[in-house]
Amino acid sequence: MRSMDAERKNTGGHTVVVGASLAGLRGAEALRRAGFAGRLTLVGDEPHRPYDRPPLSKSALTGEVAPEATVLPNLHALAADWRLGVAATGLDRQAREVRLADGTTLSYDRLLIATGSRARSWPNPTEAGLAGVHTLRGRDDAAALRQALAPGPKRVLIIGAGFIGCEVAASCRALDRAVTLIDPGPAPLARILGQPVGEIVAALHRALGVDLRSRTKVARLEGNEAGRVVRAILEDGNVVETDLVVVALGAVRNTEWLSGSGLDAGPGGVVCNEAGHALDTEGRPDRAIAAAGDVARFPHPLFDGRPVALEHWGHAVAQGEHAGRLLAGEANETDYAEMPAFWSSQGGITIKSVGLTEGADSMVFAQGSPKEGRFVVVYGAKGRCIAAVSFDSARWLPAYAEQIAARAPFPPICGGTDEHNLTVLSPGFPEKRTSP
Amino acid sequence: MPDSSLPPDATPPLRVTVDLNRCQAYAQCCYAAPGHFVLHGREALFYDPAPSSSARLAIERARVSCPVQAIRVEDPERQGR
Amino acid sequence: MKTGQLFEAVKDEANRADPYPLYARLRETPVSRQDDGIYVVSTHAAITSLLHDPRISSETLPPSERPRTGNPFSDWIVNPVKDHLTNTHRPFIFRDPPDHDRLRMAVMGQFTHQRVHAMRGRSHDLVADLLDKQSDATSFDLVCDLAYPLPVTVICEMLGVPPEDEPQFHGWATQLASALEPDNLGNEEARAKNIITFDEISTYMRGLIKEKRRHPQDDMLSGLSAGSGPGGEPGMGEVDLIASAILLLVAGHETTVNLIANSTLALVRHPDILARLAGEPDLAPRLIEEMLRYDPPVHFRTRRALSAIDIAGITIPEGADIVLLLASGNRDPAVFCDPDRFDPDRPDIRHFGFGGGLHYCAGAPLARFEAEAALVALAQRLVHPRLIDDPPPYRSGAALRGPMHLRLAIDGVAPRR
């Protein structure tokens, strides 16, 4: 049991949560659970109560779940004021005020920044504005994409083979739509999982019937007279006839509203200390403010204090709850050390990851084998175990998560069951992408 | 999914979410509340995020039988906002 | 008592009725080496860790070696072949991946939620019938009169084993289940007996499977014999099929009996909760999970270390025998507040009542439905049940632990609702 400093326990005043999504909701619940009895306001730029995003690229596209059914369960009574459909546009830390898009302001005693990120749009605004060009981030995006998929487009072109691009491709194939998936990298997901695993993902998508084009880019999108997208011209000169384009080029953190606030915030996120307090441009923590979820960039103690901003579901929950306790005066200054973890499912295969693969210089196939379609890959950097990824083998991952947390030597487990040969491979990460 | 296709009834639905990081595909929920929880392939758990309140007991069985306690449920009739 | 002798005491029948104080002593050393070289793992964290560790093997059964008969043909040709087959085609509870996964998947392909739900309704009817039989009684034995016949009938119907053959394989099942008791693993006589039993039950199963192939019905054995599951799961060879069928039959016999008997014992000892369950049957799912934590049917399972494992400040050496003391993890105060209290309102019960990891109990959903049917009916229909013997007499097993008899005095049985 942690000792609580009653002096610093925050039980009253007004706490404002900007960002009515997973991290914001779990943060608000944690505040209440920690005994915060004051006024609580949640601000969200979308008109919806907090909802769950993972189904949006999967069951919401295939029609198994209605996008509006993804409202998140509320797990602790909030007694909150909801300001939905109105974005925050500015922050004045001296006055302790958040400015909103409707011209009103909210004064705060404590502030939780959970504004998340948005889909990166196609860089050419004219082409991005063509009818039939979509991005996928929110529930309304999923509803629009679902509607566009329903009449049976000629061919869906997906730009970017990251997790969202791959999941959308698999969902479109489940609907029996023709799909072309384009990525400049050597293989899908290679930037995160490395090239050998990327090749396995490539084979999976080819088996699903996806027309996969690696190592190429879309040079431009062309529309017809009605302003509808009709084709994409690739850099290699090839042409893809399409009437539905999904731009899946990753996310941009929503920090613009913080410009001029004096906080150290930019495209990399809101810079925080270990505890999750936002830092000002001088590097001093503002103890009235915490950040959580996609938008927070913080030094991760499990990875030598390297600053990371994680776009993971579990991280939004864990860091949101941590930030809620922090603002309520209940959490320690340095106790956020959640093991990063995410999952994806594509074409019936479940991919799960613990740790962070970034910076890996070696990898081994541990349990299982790609041939059987289920396996664990373990990643190492400088002789330490830093990440593990499973394909349909999730029950081994907790053991590897423990090894990562213990900073075990790489490879951490030898002589295990269903182990073939622990040949150390190079992950072969592609060069960092500079432009789509 | 049976419930999302039903006409909206007077009682609000339950709200369900599963921590799929934690989920290890033990499939106990799929037996407890078939249709509301379904495994696709070996490990991909698909679940109904808004089951009708008439499925309350089945969803409760699913929640409590999860070996890793990954299922969270909000029951609007039993807990105020 | 020294730490290194605590597990010996756990196996001692004198401690069968309440091994929990011994478990509390064992938890003081999360992984402790016993004087006989076995490593006992007793905390929730250490058990969780090892259940997911690929260095832990379930291939712990010593090799079969049929006793000499004096007939050279049997001793030099037939029995060595049989031994080889038995050793290479163990049931999947004693196998590691990838074989374990393949066999288990084939079985689970037949263990459909439709079949389980059909048995749920069937359990309610069976319980009602079994209780009707006690309507004039002033006492009865819950084990013989309900906890045993219910799961045995259910597993027989599910598998497609004729219930009239039950008396024949009752003894076989009890004998084979003793393979989970560590002292029997090392005991030559017990092993020889198990081998003979295995041959007998194999012969029986082979005949039954032949019959299922000829006249397939809507049951698991017919499905498994037909070669592929509804999801196109691949079938299995004859020897694996027999081993799997025997496993399901034996597992369906022993464990659910304990679950129902242990639960009834706890409920009769907590009359307030018993009364609450009668009026609030929706409590049953939560109550059963708490039961699986508080007094589970399987107290421990054995494993072997494939390579050295550093855990909780100790190194388990390669080849060591490991006992995962599941029932002790269930009482770990680091995870459960006031762990020795039976409290169905406990939140987030992460128990080991069905094990965990790759070998998580395949029959868990069936066991839960059977227990729910039995406990709700007992709570609603038994009038003023009292224990005649407290503690009741236990069967000898320390791993599969449960009362041999649970005699209840009653003031009557209410009519079925």
Image (spheres, coloured by chain):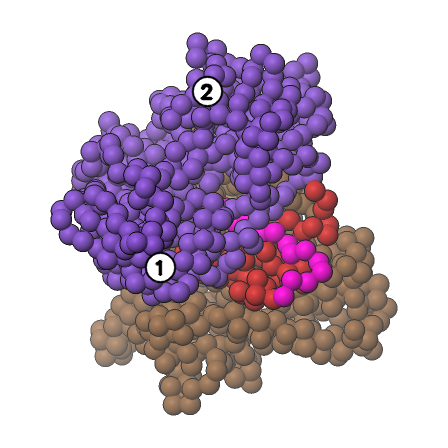
Residue at 60% in and 46% down = A73
Question: Disc 1 is attached to a residue of which chain?
Answer: A
Q: Nearer the viewer, residue A88 or C103?
A: A88
Chain that the image shows in red: B
- A19 lies left or right of C220: right
Question: How far across and how far down the image is residue A93, in percent?
Answer: 56, 15
Q: Nearest the camera: A215 or C221?
A: A215
Q: Which residue is mark 2?
A: A259
Q: Which residue is mark 1?
A: A172
- Say whether residue A291 is visible: yes
* In this rendering, position of residue B11 left or right of residue C356: right
Residue A26 against residue A63 in the figure, above or below? above
Q: Is B38 placed left or right of C408 in the picture?
A: left
Q: Nearer the viewer, residue C392 or A306?
A: A306
Colour displayed for chain C in the image of the structure: brown
Part of the protein shown in magenta: B7-26
Rendered view: C129 above or below B56: below
**Considering the image in quadrants, where does the N terminus of chain A appear?**
top right
- Vertical side of B17 occupied by B38: above or below: below
Is C298 positioned to the left or the right of C392 in the image? left
Residue type of the residue flagged with mark 1:
Cys
Q: Residue C406 occupies which quadrant of the picture? A: bottom right
- Give residue C113's position: percent from left, percent from top: 52, 69
